[in-house]
Image (cartoon, helix red, strand yellow):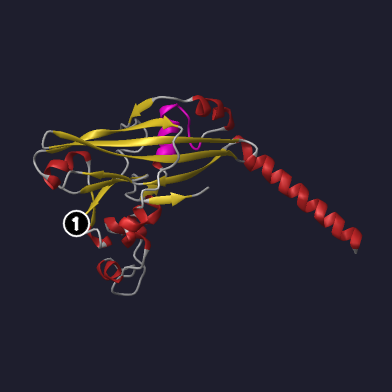
Amino acid sequence: MRKKSIVALAGMLVMVFTLYGCWGGKTVTRNIRVIAKAEVGGKMVEGSAVMGLRWQASDRGRMYISTNTEAVILDLDGRGTVYVLNAWMGDDNLSYVSYWPYLILRIFGMKGNGKLEDFPRLRSAQGRYPVEPLVGGPPQLPLMVAFRDETKRETMFEVKPGDFAGVFGSDVRFAGLWFEFTDDSPTDSGLRNRLSVMWKANPGFRETFPLRDRNGKLIPSVDYAFPQKLGKTAFFRRAY
């Protein structure tokens, strides 16, 4: 019996070290500061947040991506607030979280989640880059949203770059997005307290946007209204 226990323990240790070699032995962690700017009444305003991005060795020479991210808060000097999310809308009109690692890989010519041979480039990358739609990539900038009432999730709506004047005033314009590699730690700005509506059950939200139709059938995700497409992880995520 004792011999079997020793054999079982040895097997477990082999498994642990194998997993460490696969997942923990090869890791690249980079932080980027995402900067959003707008012009309000002739004055430039800015919001930023640092995102933590980690690429780990996976099977077959591929990488696994995890993120510590939160929305960039862009306050428009009393006109309203825009939240820049780590997400985008796909061709099927569904929301996909994890825009920033995807964008970086595309900018540096890497495909999919990237491969292990991309590690040196990710480690050495420096500088500031404008965020622009990429050919063959997401059809737009990452999602930007606002709330008509920040205490009610159902009032969330998308704000596209050309929408700023119509939504916030004729003298308000979107000035652009940039990301910059940094050694600063990921931001924790208290967003979960400011937008607690995204982290709790909202009966009003479910009444306005039910998950089932009047016949009791589940509504397909492709038919969700805009606020249903985005959950809390698009606003705040801690994955490592």
Stretch in magenta? 100-113
- The picture quadrant where one finds residue 208 is bottom left
Q: Quadrant of the N terminus?
A: bottom right
Q: Position of residue 75 (x, y in %)?
A: 23, 45
Instruction: Name the residue at 35% across, 50% down.
Output: 95
Residue 101 drawn at (x, y percent)? 44, 38
Q: Nearer the viewer, residue 85 or 158?
A: 85
Image location of residue 207, percent across then percent down? 27, 71
Q: Is residue 222 above or below residue 59?
A: below
Residue drawn at x 15%, y 34% as measured from the top left:
43
As drawn, the residue found furthest toward the left would be: 170
> As shown in the figure, which amino acid type bears the numbered disc 1?
Arg
Instruction: Name, please, the residue furthest toward the bottom.
Output: 215
Residue tagged 1: 148
Q: What is the total number of numbered labels drawn onto the structure image? A: 1
Quadrant of residue 152 in the image?
A: bottom left
Residue under the point 12% across and 41% down? 165
Would residue 115 be counted in the magenta stretch?
no
Q: Does residue 8 show up?
A: yes
Percent position (x, y) of residue 160?
22, 42
Q: Is residue 89 visible?
A: no
Label 1 crowd bin: few (<14), some (14–19), many (20+), radius 10 Å: few
Q: Is residue 179 above or below residue 149?
A: above
SS assignment at label 1 = loop
Q: Is residue 26 left or right of residue 240?
A: right
